[in-house]
């Protein structure tokens, strides 16, 4: 990402040019400051815990695939009574990233190429720079 303001409070940096063959395991455990920032960003009363176990691996020629699991304990306000409601999140995650200069990224997103979107399928790849 180019703009630091767009980064998540739990962002991490991975050198994707030199990923191990089996991928790079990443463990993110949010500290108090990061949890407070997450709560503010997503309009939650609090984030009691946040943990992500991820694997960053090469995908196709220059792309990156991130897979893993995110777990969090959050408290949000009930939309009717505004009373605190606790929730536990435990979800698998999977995302693809392509370099901005990638032919696939340019053709599919900017160059008029076709991309088939399936509401039940995986998200389209995001682009990254650097």
Image: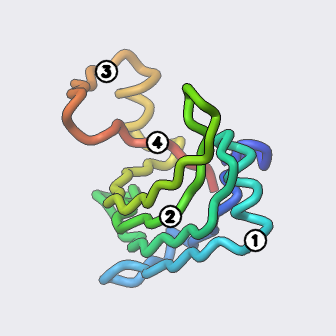
Nearer to us in this view, 35 or 130: 35
The spot of residue 3 in percent (x, y) is 76, 43
Q: Taking 46 as reference, is 74 left or right?
A: left
Residue at x 61% of width, y 47% of height: 84
SS class, disc 1: helix
Q: Nearer the viewer, residue 110 or 86?
A: 86
Q: Earlier along the polypeptide chain: callout 2 or callout 3?
A: 2
Mark 1 → mark 2, Cα distance in angstroms = 13 Å
- Say above or below: 40 vs 30: above
Which residue is located at x 31 percent, y 21 percent? 113
Q: Sequence-wise, which precedes: disc 4 or disc 1?
A: 1
Horizontal and vertical percent position of residue 115: 27, 25
- Mark 4 surroundings within 10 Å by alpha-carbon count, few (fewer than 14), some (14 through 19), many (20 or more): some
Report the Cα–Cα distance between label 4 and label 1: 29 Å
| Residue 45 horizontal/vertical position (percent) | 69, 48
Measured in 3D between alpha carbons, the distance from the residue under mark 3 to the one under mark 1, in whole angstroms, is 44 Å
Residue linked to disc 3:
113
Q: Nearer the viewer, mark 4 or mark 1?
A: 1
For label 2, the residue is 72
Q: Nearer the viewer, mark 3 or mark 1?
A: 1
97 vs 126: above or below: below
- Camera-nearest label, 2 or 3: 2
Q: Mark 4 — residue?
A: 126
């Amino acid at each position: 990402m180019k703009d630091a303001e767009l980064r998540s409070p739990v962002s991490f940096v991975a050198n994707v040019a030199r990923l191990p063959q089996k991928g790079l395991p990443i463990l993110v455990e949010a500290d108090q400051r990061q949890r407070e920032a997450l709560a503010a960003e997503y309009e939650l009363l609090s984030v009691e815990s946040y943990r992500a176990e991820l694997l960053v691996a090469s995908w196709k020629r220059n792309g990156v695939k991130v897979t893993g699991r995110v777990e969090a304990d959050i408290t949000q306000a009930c939309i009717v009574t505004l009373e605190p409601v606790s929730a536990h999140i435990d979800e698998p995650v999977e995302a693809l990233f392509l370099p901005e200069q990638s032919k696939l990224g340019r053709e599919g997103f900017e160059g008029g190429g076709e991309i088939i979107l399936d509401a039940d399928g995986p998200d389209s790849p995001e682009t990254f720079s650097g």
